[in-house]
Image (cartoon, rainbow, N blue to C red):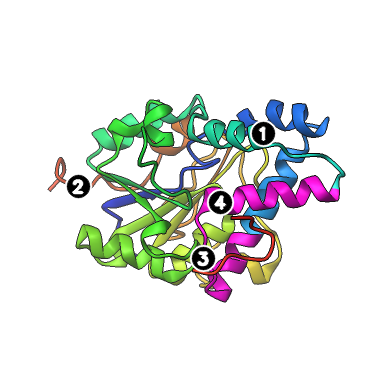
Amino acid sequence: MTAAPSVLVFDVNETLIDIDALSPLFEQIFGDARAMREWFGQLVMYSMTSALSGCYVDYFTLGQGVLRMLGEIHATRISAGDMERIKQSMLTMPAHPDVADGLAGLRDDGFRLVTLTNSPPNPLGPSPLESAGLGGFFERQFSVDACHTYKPARDVYHYVCRELQVVPAECMMVAAHVWDTIGAQSAGFTAALITRQATRHCRSKGCRDRRSSQQIYANSPSSSIFNVETCTRVVDRGWPPPWWKNSRLPKCGPGHTAAATPFVHR
């Protein structure tokens, strides 16, 4: 039986923060709000390509390169002003409405809460979490930028462990993307998958999990199957009611004994 985690490592974009807030801006630029999802999907794909190839550029720079690429694909001019508006919007996206209550409950249960994001630090101002009013919930905010690679590379998850002076088995990755939870599991974490409106898990057997004893479940919000035996939980569109309130997860914690890719313009 797997021991209960003491550290919950949260992804940020889409897990805690609502990236759909960017859609109106993409509609203004491209004439179609769905362009935001195309951009974000390409951004994730190229971040993984960067991790595999060793050609690192930070997430904001990568995002601007992908935006220019989409502009060329859709014959849409992307101005410097468009670039700046999207960058600033990425720094100021709102939290999902269910997040604050869920984090408060987990913190009260004694879990250590930290984040791990693909986004780089913001040296000129508050982080996206702080702008969304969530910064106070977290002990640390980690960025893959310190490792010069992206999730789901194992190095980024091990980096968190080193910084916190814990072993991977003490950590659970909480994310809205299966590629993130699988990456964390490959590094020795357990994982919890939260499905948002635009995220679901892949039902292909080969993509379900690295361990045959663990599976990814998709259930209605009224169910409660989150437990340390399966180590992976899907909560449809939100988490406080089914997740922390009805969870069978035991209480624990102090309260309870390089070169740019070709499309990136510098």
Task: Evaluate if marks 3 and 1 touch, with contact meaning CB atoms under 8 Å apart.
Answer: no
Q: Which mark is residue 253?
A: 2
Amino acid found under the numbered disc labelled 1: Asp
Q: Earlier in the sequence, mark 1 or mark 2?
A: 1
Q: Earlier in the sequence, mark 1 or mark 4?
A: 4
Residue located beneath label 1 in the image: 82
Q: Secondary structure at mark 3?
A: loop
Q: Secondary structure at mark 1?
A: helix
Residue located beneath label 3 in the image: 56
Q: Residue at (83%, 40%) from the top-left corner?
A: 76
Q: Secondary structure at mark 4?
A: helix
- Asked whether the viewer can see residue 149, the reply is yes
Residue located beneath label 4 in the image: 61
Q: Earlier in the sequence, mark 4 or mark 3?
A: 3
Q: Earlier in the sequence, mark 4 or mark 2?
A: 4
Magenta residues (range): 46-73
Q: Dividing the image into 4 quarters, which one contains the C terminus?
A: bottom right
Instruction: Give neighbour class at mark 1: few <14, some 14-19, many 20+ (Cα, 10 Å).
Output: some
Residue 74 placement (x, y as % from top left): 86, 45
Q: Earlier in the sequence, mark 3 or mark 1?
A: 3
Amino acid found under the numbered disc labelled 4: Thr
Q: How many marks?
A: 4
- Asked whether the viewer can see residue 1, the reply is no
Task: Evaluate if marks 3 and 2 touch, with contact meaning CB atoms under 8 Å apart.
Answer: no
Q: Which mark is residue 198?
A: none
**Dot in front, 3 or 2:** 3
> Rounded to the nearest whole Å, what is the CA distance between mark 4 and mark 2?
38 Å
226 lies left or right of 167: right
Instruction: Give neighbour class at mark 3: few <14, some 14-19, many 20+ (Cα, 10 Å).
Output: many
